Amino acid sequence: MAQDASSKKSLKQDVYDHPDFYAIDDLLTAEHKLIRSSIRDFVKKEITPYVEDWAQRAHFPYEIVKKFGDIGAFGPTVSEQYGGGGLDYISYGIIMQEIERGDSGMRSTASVQGSLVMYPIYKFGSEAQKKKYLPKLASGEWLGCFGLTEPDHGSNPGGMVTNFKDMGDHYLLNGAKMWISNSPRADIAVVWAKNEEGRVHGLVVERGMEGFSTPETHGKWSLRASATGELVFDNVKVPKENLLPGKSGLGAPLMCLDSARYGIAWGAIGAAMDCYDSARRYALERIQFGKPIASFQLVQKKLAEMLSEITKAQLLNWRLGTLMNEGKATTAQISLAKRNNVHVALEIAREARQIHGGMGITGEYPIMRHMMNLESVVTYEGTHDIHLLILGNNITGIPAFF
Ligand code: TGC
Ligand code: FAD
């Protein structure tokens, strides 16, 4: 049946404005779509209008923590028994995508809390630890952070020197962590440290423990709306009941990273979609040489390539989400998605910046902020090259990290 011009226009608008070029919506459940629209509405109302100002002022809007708790952005896959959402991994991915459409720093706050603080307590914590911490973290009453990276041990966390000694009735923790998202405002930190035998364990360190401080890192050009800092442990007495009993060894933090990297694979594509939406609109509106710049082949090439990469990444995310739901996703599969999706998102942000011309460097558009944010995302949770080496190891059976 022939469509009139107005229905054709609205169809085009639907298809291209929030790209779903391969009708991936058909693969989602009604619950997934409901979650997406509610998080999208939240981001439009609570993040998008303000985030440029927060980023310009390098301000972390602490009040967002409670709001994230209220909308169920913290620990969506954690059981409802502990205040989590009891949702599947596709729902988790969608939440990260929609928050990062607003800003990667805001997604960092949510993914650290869910995947790197609640997840280890949920998976490796005692019943008492789960009851004490998870409901408060889920509701946003408490904010948490995850301390793995050290000044001299980033890509190689196995070399960490932060350590604890058994003092009989408590542990004595010493060392320092660096580049820790949420640390300056966190109520608790899940900290990875070695015992006297050199075995890695997770400990929950609470703000207020003597000798524990969280200096903020200033001067970032990236993730400016997210608070980043250090964790310093100077003879901190940690109660014995704060050690996570369920798993030790470097595999424990690496398991948490699997969950967080999965969320980043979705999140980065949220930022890419926002760049694409803005670039497409700008290209249709901006007139040069008497025509919209969208009518030039070179601009169309950029837009077509952006849409192609977004679509491939969306399909990758959906398939990875189904594997996560079945408990079958491997670390290497997650590495492929994190590496690919952040890389293409960064390229899309750079191309979108070009389409916006000079306007692309201003805060009038979200592009430069996304681009600078993605420079952190491509480095944290395993750098672009470390993920390549994880894949290389998987393909050949030969680790090439050292
Ligand atoms: P490797 O010898 O490969 O492994 C050590 C032990 O861990 C086991 N294992 C895993 N277990 C469970 N799940 C996984 N995914 C696992 N991966 C490894 C492994 O079997 C082994 O067990 P065992 O019993 O034999 O001891 O370790 P390696 O030292 O050679 O290191 C490998 C490498 C380089 C891939 C790894 O260390 C790595 O991923 N490095 C990157 C570091 C990183 O990603 N850091 C992220 C810090 S957190 C962060 O950035 C948060 S930003 C958040 C935000 O703001 O959004
Ligand atoms: P390095 O490990 O020193 O790497 C420098 C360069 O060398 C990279 O290009 C890397 O790919 C390359 N390289 C290293 N080893 C190899 C190798 N074997 N082969 C080839 N190339 C190699 N960490 C946390 O624990 N918790 C957090 O919440 C957290 N949040 C962060 C927030 C921000 C904004 C940033 C920037 C970082 C955050 N990190 C966090 C730290 C992050 O995980 C590390 O920055 C990352 O793992 C890389 O470590 P590095 O910076 O020490 O770089």
Image (cartoon, rainbow, N blue to C red):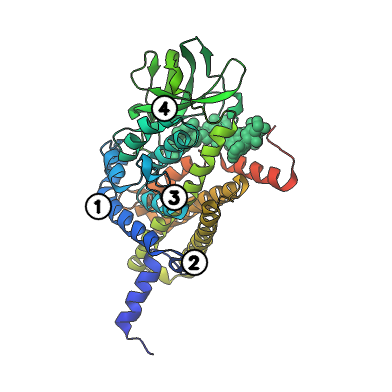
Q: In which quarter of the image is residue 282?
A: bottom left
Give the residue at the far top of this rendering.
167
Identity, as a three-letter code, of the amino acid under mark 1: Lys
In the rendered image, which residue does mark 3 sit on?
A: 267
Circle 4: residue type = Ala
Q: Residue at x 39, y 47 (%)?
A: 76
| Residue named by callout 4 | 189
Instruction: List the residue tagged with mark 1.
Output: 45
Cα gap from disc 2 to disc 4, whole angstroms: 44 Å
* Residue type, numbered disc 2: Ala
Helix, strand or loop for disc 4: strand
Residue that mark 2 sits on: 304
Where residue 54 sits: x, y (%)?
A: 29, 40
Amino acid bearing label 3: Gly
Residue 321 is left or right of residue 294, and the answer is: right
Q: Is residue 89 left or right of residue 138?
A: right
